Amino acid sequence: MSKKDSHFIKSPFKAVTEYENEFVKAFNENIAGAVTEVLKNIATVTASAVKNGLSLQNSNNDIQQ
């Protein structure tokens, strides 16, 4: 799919197609930002666990509770 045809619903109306393209662009940017935040949080928690010597046994107990 080329950049020109990046809309997800083909429309005979140019304004609709432009709106869809902007929506998809904003949606992708928002998802990318959310994934970035999740990965940062995972990295922070993992680093803290490694630094503090959290064992797998303790982690499993926390999950089961």
Image (cartoon, helix red, strand yellow):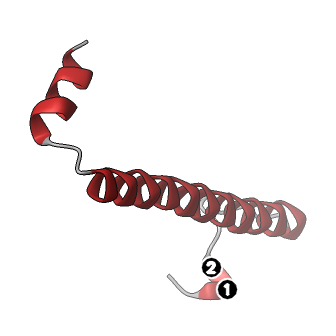
Q: Is residue 14 above or below residue 19?
A: below
Quadrant housing residue 65: top left
For label 1, the crowd category at 10 Å Cα-Cα, with few meaning under 14, some 14 to 19 and many 20 or more, is: few
Residue at position x 41%, y 61% in the image: 43
Q: Position of residue 51 (x, y in %)?
A: 32, 59
Q: Secondary structure at mark 2?
A: helix
Q: Secondary structure at mark 1?
A: helix
For label 2, the crowd category at 10 Å Cα-Cα, with few meaning under 14, some 14 to 19 and many 20 or more, is: few
Most foreground residue, 14 or 46: 46
Extreme top residue here? 65
Quadrant housing residue 7: bottom right
For disc 2, the marked residue is: 5
Most foreground residue, 32 or 43: 43
Q: Is residue 47 left or right of residue 50?
A: right
Residue at position x 37%, y 60% in the image: 47
Q: Is residue 48 left or right of residue 63?
A: right
